[in-house]
Image: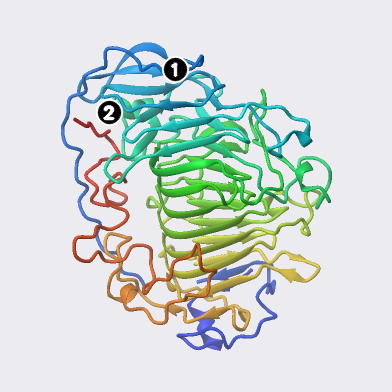
Amino acid sequence: MTNISRSLVLGCSLLALAACGPEDLGSPGTNGDINVGDITVNPAPTATPTPAGTVVPAASCPNLGTADGLVNSGTTPAAVGSYRVCTLPSTFTASATLPYVAGVVYEMSGRVNVGRDDGPTADATDGITGNPVTLSIEPGVIVYGKSGVSGGSYLVVNRGSKLNAVGTATRPIIFTGQADVSGSVTDTTSALWGGIVLLGRAPMADCAAGGVNPADRTTCFMRVEGIADNVPVFGGNTANDNSGTLKYMQIRYSGFTLELGAELQSLTLGGVGSGTTLEYIQTFNSSDDGFEVFGGTPRAKYLVSVGAEDDSFDVDSGAQFDLQFAVAVQRDGVGDRVLESDSPPDEKGPGTTPLNALPRTLSRISNFVFWGTSTGNAIGVRGTSDLYLANGVIYKPTTGQFCLNDNGNSDGGRRSDIRFYSLLLDCTTNAATAAAIAAGNTTANVFTTNTLSGKYLNGTKETNFNPVYTGFTPGFFAATTYIGGVPVPSGTDLAWTRGWTCDSPTVSFNSGISCKGLPVYN
């Protein structure tokens, strides 16, 4: 394993690593892997408790105006008062809207499907006749997964269908577990329900059938692992596929083990295309990953992962993933990596999908904070996946762990393309060294202590960092004048993390919504 840590600067400028040679990025060194590695911890602000409010149950459930109606399942206790429980149908076969109604909470009792799989193409050429629909959700709506259901409770948005869940900065949509509704969760609760599975028609590298790199990409598909009955599938050849809009949303206490080695995470993106809008989404205390991306071409902004018990972000299977403005904060001693990036065969080993499977996973991430306090490395790269990071802060205080670990796999000598631009690296020193990082692929990275406030808000070093990288493709990536994920607000502006997120002892965004309570609106 080759480790990149503070000692990397022995062969490079402290402020710029571009002088290093290009050929040794994937050098196996003594045992095959590559790893990148003073530490100031600023206290988080005290979480603001949710204002007290008594929930008065609605008299009845709303009428969706479709054959797939809601079931009035009586009432369930709230922290104070009680809610009217309106149980969702097992499958939405027609487009519908879940309205906000004071005193109503929506329940998933088992798997809930949005539409039926409509195949890899929007027309009939694929021979699959599905039932694409749109499920819309209004601001302020609360949906929970019922506990104790065989197979778990979770939401699947099938290929061709859409989820338009659009909250606001003051009324986020909240998906959570049943114990959260009754106010009986703790700061470490997780795995109360499954999560949200969003499926699309964009390309991927892992094909369940038909071999590697098929000429007809519409024949390449993947299955959602661990589901035995009516297995959801995803994939196709539509890079700009649209699976809907998710905006101003919290996904709390999720993660469900379907079978050994197959878990649901807070938000699973399978073959999701760039036409999908993913903005202002927080995952909290997932028992698996916060966000997992299987293939596809998704683009996202303003994502927050707090307390994930595996990876905060996990990008796999040839995904072409663009992300700007992100905060990931781990619970102390809990979880694996903040970011894991895999290309086939990644962890699956020899004899599975070969290393030359295309597309090769590529993540481009700008303006972020990765606060890693677990026992794993901050970032792990496997299977020759590519990773471009810019304008970020990586904090990893754990002794013996690194900012970056690359396993050194190669495809005919072609190794992972890893590029760092304008990063503040606050990681422990390690004795091992890396021979080099590709010339021109790393610029203006600094090993120093961070000055973040509350684990996420920019301080002096992040605000005044120079230079700031602006080389990512314009149009999606906005030019900024700072590194880090959240700039210091000016004037009447608020931090983009404030108002729609929930606060916890792990990290408080001063939103006034406790992760151990649900907001009550008048």
Mark 1, secondary structure of its residue: loop
Marks 2/1: CA distance?
32 Å
The label on residue 183 is 2
The label on residue 230 is none
Q: Nearer the viewer, residue 209 or 96?
A: 96
The image's colouring method is rainbow
Amino acid type at circle 2 is Gly
Q: Nearer the viewer, residue 441 or 117?
A: 117
Q: Is residue 255 visible?
A: no
Q: Position of residue 288 (x, y in %)?
A: 50, 42
Q: Is residue 270 visible?
A: yes
Q: Indicate the quadrant where residue 485 lies.
A: bottom left
Q: Position of residue 96 (x, y in %)?
A: 47, 25
Vertical position of residue 318 compared to residue 80: above or below:
below
Q: Nearer the viewer, residue 207 or 93?
A: 93
Q: Position of residue 476 (x, y in %)?
A: 50, 62
Q: Quadrant of the C terminus?
A: top left
Q: Tell us which disc is closer to us: 2 or 1.
A: 1
| Residue sitting at x 45%, y 33% | 191
Q: Quadrant of the N terminus?
A: bottom right
Q: Position of residue 221 (x, y in %)?
A: 73, 41
Amino acid type at circle 1 is Gly
Q: Is residue 398 left or right of residue 74?
A: right
Callout 1 crowding tier (Cα within 10 Å): few <14, some 14–19, many ≥20: few
Q: Is residue 281 left or right of residue 35?
A: left
Q: Is residue 237 left or right of residue 494?
A: right
Vertical position of residue 8 compared to residue 277: above or below:
below
The label on residue 65 is 1
| Residue sitting at x 50%, y 19% | 149
Point out the tag, 2 or 1, that comes first from the N-terminus: 1
Mark 2, secondary structure of its residue: loop
